[in-house]
Image: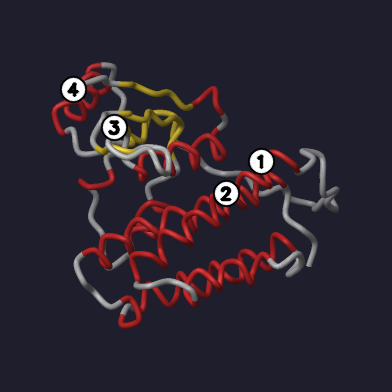
């Protein structure tokens, strides 16, 4: 199987990263991830993704599997997996050649269908900012797509996200809903956007291009 393009590889890793948020929440609620069908599916899909991207070489798969073998609990395992996948994403982003691999042309080129009258609103927990931006878009006769307002219809969060991602544009609301700091910098946490916002922002940059993705930053 040929190695995927740089853009496709980044999209695949972003998809696996996006899934981590759901399982971290379950683990924090003392839910045993081994009992989750969605987690087992994500685990296997991520292993296959890594094998596909890195041709099962250089120990990438081993690094991912070790996250779960060495972890103290499910929360620790998901944090380790998140760090490893982020490192792999950075490896592809910083070191892969944009022009590789050279893929054979096909008679029909698959294109992503997008609706330019829809804007995906990436948001955290600031409902006021979300409502304000959604209202502004409606005034411009543009339909805001807010994932939490869409029907799941039995889909997992990832499947629901992909279902509603065929938009023409995206806007990320970088509201300070979380806090974070450098490792070892105790007592120096700073406000930051939630991790799902950062992951979704990266997903849409890869999918739509930077020119079709905007951000709104709100300070404390």
Q: Mark 2 highlights which residue?
A: 11
Eye-nearest disc, 3 or 2: 2
7 left or right, relative to 23: right
Q: Which mark is residue 144?
A: 3
Give the side of residue 202 with respect to residue 161, left or right.
right
Which numbered disc, 3 or 1, marks the residue that appears first in the sequence? 1
Residue 49 lies in quadrant? bottom right
Task: Tell me which label, 3 or 2, sits earlier in the chain.
Answer: 2
Where residue 6 sits in the image (x, y, percent)?
Answer: 70, 45
**3D distance between C-alphas at marks 4 and 3:** 11 Å
Neighbourhood count class around disc 1 (C-alpha, 10 Å): few under 14, some 14–19, many 20 upward: some
Comparing 170 with 86, the one in front is 86
**Is 142 or 211 nearer to us in this picture?**
211
Q: Quadrant of residue 206?
A: top right
The relative height of residue 72 versus residue 124 in the rendered view (above or below) is below
- Total number of numbered discs in the rendering: 4
How far apart, in angstroms, are the residues tagged by discs 1 and 2?
11 Å
Q: Against 114, is 139 above or below?
A: above
Q: Which residue is mark 4?
A: 132
Q: Secondary structure at mark 2?
A: helix
Q: CA distance from mark 3 to mark 2?
A: 23 Å
Give the residue number, with chain letter if any, for mark 1: 93
């Amino acid at each position: 199987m040929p190695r995927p393009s740089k853009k496709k590889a980044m999209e695949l890793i972003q998809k696996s990263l996006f899934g981590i948020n759901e399982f971290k929440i379950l683990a924090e609620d003392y839910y045993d991830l081994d009992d989750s069908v969605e987690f087992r599916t994500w685990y296997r899909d991520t292993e296959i993704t890594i094998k596909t991207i890195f041709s099962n070489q250089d120990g990438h798969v081993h690094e991912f599997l070790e996250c779960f073998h060495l972890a103290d609990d499910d929360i620790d395992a998901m944090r380790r997996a998140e760090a490893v996948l982020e490192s792999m994403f950075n490896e592809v982003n910083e070191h892969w050649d944009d022009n590789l691999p050279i893929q054979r042309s096909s008679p029909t080129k698959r294109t992503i269908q997008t609706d330019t009258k829809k804007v995906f609103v990436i948001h955290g927990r600031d409902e006021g900012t979300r409502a304000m931006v959604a209202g502004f878009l409606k005034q411009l006769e543009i339909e805001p797509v807010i994932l939490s307002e869409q029907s799941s219809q039995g889909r997992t969060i990832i499947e629901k996200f992909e279902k509603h991602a065929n938009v023409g544009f995206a806007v990320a609301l970088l509201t300070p809903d979380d806090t974070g700091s450098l490792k070892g910098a105790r007592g120096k946490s700073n406000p930051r956007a939630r991790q799902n916002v950062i992951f979704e922002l990266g997903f849409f940059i890869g999918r739509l291009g930077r020119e079709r993705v905007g951000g709104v930053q709100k300070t404390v």
